[in-house]
């Protein structure tokens, strides 16, 4: 088990190193001089050269890459060309919105999908199963930004229960912050819950046909007891895989919903940096997205160890 964890951790470090080099190279060959963008087209050549030197752009690519890596290791993400403030502060400020939003969406998605998938599998072929399948198809087919607009129309414009957009900041109180994130979290969660419910249903149906389930029933367990004691725990491995992928998607892919609800999250920061060609912010945010995906995958692998005893034996 320890060897398995060590191998996965070394793979995580290697993956991050390769991804950081790839991100740096791709951003480095993109057209557009950050110094020229900052000064504008009317800048004098000597002023432009001085700014390029102060930004380290006159150094070889290898030197700049190593300086970037050393700075990241020290928590120094550089200074935004657009905002003129440390990128680390910008990212931390936006993560305080995006991470709670993603966690709320994952919580809603799990609370909706797991019971729905298990019940649909346990009553396969019934009206409940068909209703769950219809719910999943509708939620998958409708884009989350459209769901967000419908939620705004119903709960903000018509009923006035929730704000239509914006974020008051956590300094305004946890209740106000959670209230501002509730509708965006539901808009993000519904499509994800549909996918998760279908995976859960399929996994539970597969385990229901296993011999050990029939043995448990033969020993006197009721169908419900066999379902929750033996079937659901053994069906969780593919469900955990989808949850890990969904968290990565929600962190990196919430840009549309954040724009619909005017939330100052990480996705919106990346979108604004791209529009303003703030290459340093884009580079740091992309690496952060990639790092979060790799770390979540590592945690999913560790969850496999807890859920599947056969994997511990292989380690």
Image: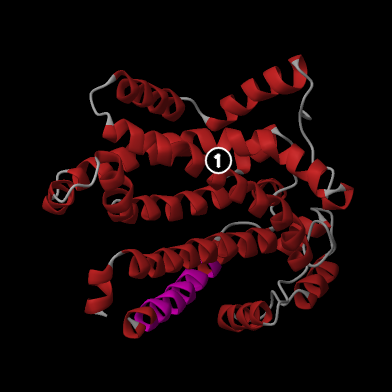
At x 34%, y 25%, the residue is 133
Q: Quadrant of the C terminus?
A: bottom left
- 102 or 218: which is nearer to us? 218
| Quarter of the figure with residue 282 | bottom right
* Number of residue marks: 1
Q: Which residue is mark 1?
A: 108
Q: Is residue 33 visible?
A: no
How many residues crowd mark 1 within 10 Å: few (<14), some (14–19), many (20+)? some
Above or below 189: residue 279 = below
Q: Going by the picture, which residue comes out furthest to the top?
A: 158
At x 56%, y 51%, the residue is 252
Q: Is residue 237 visible?
A: yes
Give percent across and percent down for residue 201: 30, 38
- 169 or 93: which is nearer to us? 169
Whether residue 15 is in magenta: the answer is yes
Q: Magenta stretch: dominant SS? A: helix
Dot 1 falls on a residue whose secondary structure is helix
Q: Quadrant of the N terminus?
A: bottom left
Give percent across and percent down for residue 257: 63, 37
Above or below 123: residue 45 = below
- 164 or 210: which is nearer to us? 210
Q: Going by the picture, which residue comes out furthest to the front?
A: 220
Whether residue 187 is in magenta: the answer is no
Q: Which residues are magenta?
A: 6-24
At x 82%, y 51%, the residue is 170
Side (left or right) of 191 relative to 183: left
Give percent across and percent down for residue 244: 44, 55
Q: Going by the picture, which residue comes out furthest to the right?
A: 172
| Quarter of the figure with residue 67 | bottom right
Color theme of the render: secondary structure
Give percent across and percent down for residue 17: 48, 77
């Amino acid at each position: 088990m320890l060897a398995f964890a060590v191998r996965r951790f070394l793979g995580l470090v290697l993956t991050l190193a390769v991804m950081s080099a790839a991100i740096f190279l791709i951003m480095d060959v993109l057209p557009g001089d950050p110094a020229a963008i900052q000064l504008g087209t009317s800048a004098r050549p000597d002023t432009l050269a001085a700014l390029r030197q102060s930004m380290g752009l006159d150094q070889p690519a290898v030197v700049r890459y190593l300086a970037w890596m050393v700075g990241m290791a020290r928590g120094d993400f550089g200074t935004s060309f657009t905002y003129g403030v440390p990128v680390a502060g910008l990212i931390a400020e936006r993560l305080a919105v995006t991470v709670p939003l993603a966690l709320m969406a994952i919580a809603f998605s799990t609370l909706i999908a797991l019971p729905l998938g298990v019940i649909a599998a346990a009553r396969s072929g019934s009206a409940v199963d068909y209703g769950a399948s219809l719910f999943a198809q509708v939620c998958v087919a409708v884009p989350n930004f459209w769901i967000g607009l419908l939620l705004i129309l119903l709960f903000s414009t018509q009923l006035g229960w929730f704000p239509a957009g914006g974020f008051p900041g956590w300094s305004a109180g946890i209740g106000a912050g959670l209230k501002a994130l509730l509708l965006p979290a539901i808009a993000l969660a519904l499509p994800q819950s549909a996918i998760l419910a279908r995976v859960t249903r399929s996994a539970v149906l597969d385990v229901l046909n296993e011999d050990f389930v029939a043995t448990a029933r033969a020993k006197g367990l009721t169908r419900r007891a066999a379902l929750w004691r033996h079937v659901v725990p053994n069906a969780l491995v593919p469900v955990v895989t989808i949850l890990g992928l969904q968290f990565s998607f929600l962190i990196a892919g919430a840009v549309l919903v954040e724009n619909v609800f005017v939330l100052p999250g990480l996705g919106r920061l990346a979108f604004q940096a791209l529009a303003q060609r703030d290459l340093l912010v884009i580079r740091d945010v992309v690496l952060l997205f990639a790092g979060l995906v790799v770390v979540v995958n590592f945690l999913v692998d560790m969850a496999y160890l807890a859920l599947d005893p056969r994997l511990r034996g292989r380690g």
